[in-house]
Amino acid sequence: MNEKMSMFLNGYKERKYMSSWYTVIPFMVIIGAVIGGFTNFLAIRMLFRPYRTLYIGKWRLPFTPGLIPKRQGELAAQIGKLVVGYLVTPESIYKKLTDEAFKRETEEWINAKLNSWLEKGMTPEEILNQFGINNPLEKMDSAIDRTIEKKYDSLKKKYLDEPVRNIFPGQLTETIHSKIPELADHIIQKGTDYFSSEEGKEKIRVMIENFLKNRGKLWNLVQMFIGEDQLADKVQPEIMRFFHNQGTRDLLISILEEEARKLEQRKLGEFYSGVNEEKVLRFLKEGASDLFPLEGYLRKPIKDLIEPFRPKLLDTVVPRLLAAAGDYLTRQSGEILERFQVEDIVRKEIESFSLERLEELVIAVAKKELVMITYLGALLGGLIGVIQGIIVMITS
């Protein structure tokens, strides 16, 4: 009887022990998985929540606000330093601007935009109107006229009391003096050509006649013994010899040089007296208007204005401008970043960024990874539950 009872009790204990393995270990696994998964899920949420510090009376609840709301200012400052120190740097800008593919794409984009804009057929006048400049032709004409008047008055006040030699460039004065011998030769040649002609001979006869008529009987004697024509024939060769004489040339050069020096010493105002300033200004304004026909330029499509230069503009000017702009940005990128205060801009933007929106963005971007972290916590919790269950069963 005792043996049967003992066997029954031992069997009961074994069955009870085996049933404990099947109940305790799964229970421990489930509890561990739930705790592990919930802990990781809670840790992820506590990165952002709560958004504000919570109090019970005067007592602040621990771990409030969440990590990112609490450290948002420090995080913003660090991200600002990261952007300026490692992401948007002069070196990275240089690499981007010197990248051949980027330059080619930028050039193609600008050419496409420029061609599209030119095809609209807009005129300079329409563009100025878009910028709020109405009646640009009248305004530009008025501005040019005022500029001419101001410049005219300025030059008049500046040079009117100045000697001519101070106004003309020294090289021009030297050139004028160097041309005096040629001028003298030209005058002598013209005089020689005139007085050697029949017209010149007739002029000599008339001059002699006018001279001697006022001399009374002398004129009658000349007519009686020589005659007017013979006297002209005799005087004409003498005049020719006078013109061909070297002394005549030297005298003429000396007279011209002396007169030139006198003119240089005279003030410009002496030549300016009696000038009709209204006519001068009108002449200058009309000349400027003829030189720059603004109406034709302002009311003609820009496409037509630049058509002769369009291939050069697209193939040469645009690439050169881009290259110059790239070089300038490369050299000045450090100063530009400093002046724009990129670090402060990034910091302020992150500090002012909505925590709700930031949480949505992070979770939307890393949703799969965050879910996997939750699952990993459940898996680790389950494994820990298995180990705990085995330890409990062995030690019980």
Image (spheres, rainbow, N blue to C red):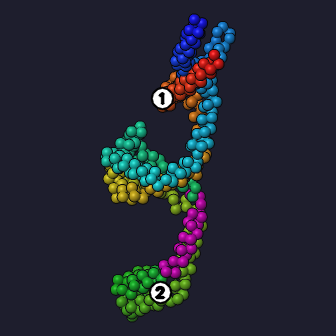
Query: Residue 37, percent across and down?
Result: 54, 22
Magenta span of residues:
160-184
Q: Residue at x 57, y 34 (%)?
A: 346
Q: Amino acid at mark 1?
A: Lys
- Compared with residue 255, is residue 76 higher up or lower down, i.e. above or below? above
Cα distance between the residues tagged 1 and 2: 112 Å
Circle 2 residue: 243
Q: Describe the element under mark 2 as helix, strand or loop.
A: helix
Q: Describe the element under mark 1 as helix, strand or loop.
A: helix
Whichever of labels 1 and 2 marks the residue nearer the N terminus, that label is 2
> Where does the C terminus fall, quadrant-wise?
top right
* In-image side of 309 versus 173 (left or right): left
Query: Residue 239, percent across and down?
Result: 45, 88
Q: Quadrant of residue 336?
A: top right
Q: Residue at x 58, y 55 (%)?
A: 158
The residue at the far bottom in this view is 225
Q: Amino acid at mark 2?
A: Phe
Q: Which mark is residue 367?
A: 1
- Residue 344 vs residue 273, the one in the foreground: 344
